[in-house]
């Protein structure tokens, strides 16, 4: 015999309805018991005992409720304190990660600036004697580090100066390639290249010192910092980078 798929499931009294029946029985007993007690025993004692028991039960319930709320409040406070400590630990770990990343990336940029300084020295000394002169002018470390450092470094003045300097590196490459083209008067272009190389040679020494300081102690923006960064007093010329002290500007 197959079961009808449309047949609704039936409730079993012993497993599904006995809690309701027990509740009804308890209510009936609670109402009938005081009445029977008052009939067969002393009525005055029955109602006095019932009132006393009800008062004691109510007081015990209120005490238990207050204690439960107190314990729940303490639990919420402990949970909030744990969450705060967890957030502080996460911020400290993120801050440490940022500082480590800044040191590593600035270390690579510092090595690249040293190579550029050596190449610029050669360019100032030798480029006028050769038509085809292509020194080592790397920019890969800065290209890989500029975007991540821009997100975590608060020294925006240094980041802007490095970007300007590496723009001059690209400009120097272009001038050297232009000089090597056929039909270009190398003697006329060489002084222009020499002027840019000398300016860059002065700038790279200043930038290398600032980058080495960042390797030792990076200016990492705090994790919870919502400000726009420090305002840096500076002036940039068309031909070179010029760093200006804020106190010097104020005195002037």
Image (cartoon, rainbow, N blue to C red):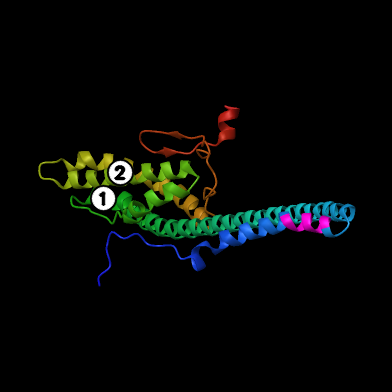
Q: Quadrant of the N terminus?
A: bottom left
The span from disc 1 to disc 2 (Cα, nearest Å) is 8 Å
Tag 2's secondary structure? helix
Give the quarter of the image for residue 165.
Answer: top left
Q: Which residues are magenta?
A: 32-39
Tell me the tag on residue 127: 1
The kind of secondary structure the magenta stretch mainly shows is helix
Residue 68 spot, x, y in % from top left? 71, 56
Which residue is depicted at the point 40% across and 46% down?
Answer: 162
Which residue sits at x=30%, y=54%? 137
Give the residue furthest to the bottom.
1
Say whether residue 94 is left or right of residue 131: right
**Label total for image:** 2
In this rendering, position of residue 20 left or right of residue 57: left
* Mark number displayed over residue 219: none
- Measured as percent of width and height from the top left, residue 80 is found at 63, 53
| Residues under numbered marks 1 and 2 in contact, where contact means CB atoms less than 8 Å apart | yes
Q: Is residue 66 left or right of residue 236?
A: right
The residue to which callout 2 is attached is: 194
| In magenta stretch: residue 192 | no
């Amino acid at each position: 015999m197959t079961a009808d798929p449309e047949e609704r499931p039936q409730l079993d009294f012993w497993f599904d309805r006995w809690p309701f029946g027990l509740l009804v029985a308890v209510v009936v007993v609670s109402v009938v018991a005081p009445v029977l007690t008052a009939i067969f025993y002393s009525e005055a004692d029955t109602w006095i005992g019932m009132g006393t028991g009800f008062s004691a039960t109510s007081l015990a319930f209120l005490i238990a409720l207050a204690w439960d709320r107190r314990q729940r409040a303490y639990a919420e406070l402990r949970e909030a304190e744990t969450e705060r400590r967890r957030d502080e630990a996460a911020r400290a770990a993120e801050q440490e990660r940022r500082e480590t990343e800044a040191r590593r990336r600035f270390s690579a940029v510092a090595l690249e600036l040293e190579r550029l300084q050596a190449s610029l020295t050669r360019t100032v000394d030798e480029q006028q004697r050769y038509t085809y002169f292509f020194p080592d002018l790397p920019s890969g470390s800065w290209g890989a580090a500029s975007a991540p450092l821009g997100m975590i470094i608060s020294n925006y003045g240094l980041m802007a100066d490095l970007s300007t300097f590496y723009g001059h590196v690209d400009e120097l490459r272009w001038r050297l390639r232009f000089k090597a083209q056929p039909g270009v008067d190398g003697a006329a272009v060489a002084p222009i290249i020499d002027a840019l190389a000398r300016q860059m040679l002065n700038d790279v020494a200043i930038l290398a010192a600032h980058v080495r300081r960042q390797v030792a102690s990076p200016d990492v923006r705090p994790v919870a910092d919502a400000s726009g960064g420090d305002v840096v007093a500076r002036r940039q010329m068309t031909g070179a980078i010029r760093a200006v002290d804020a106190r010097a500007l104020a005195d002037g």
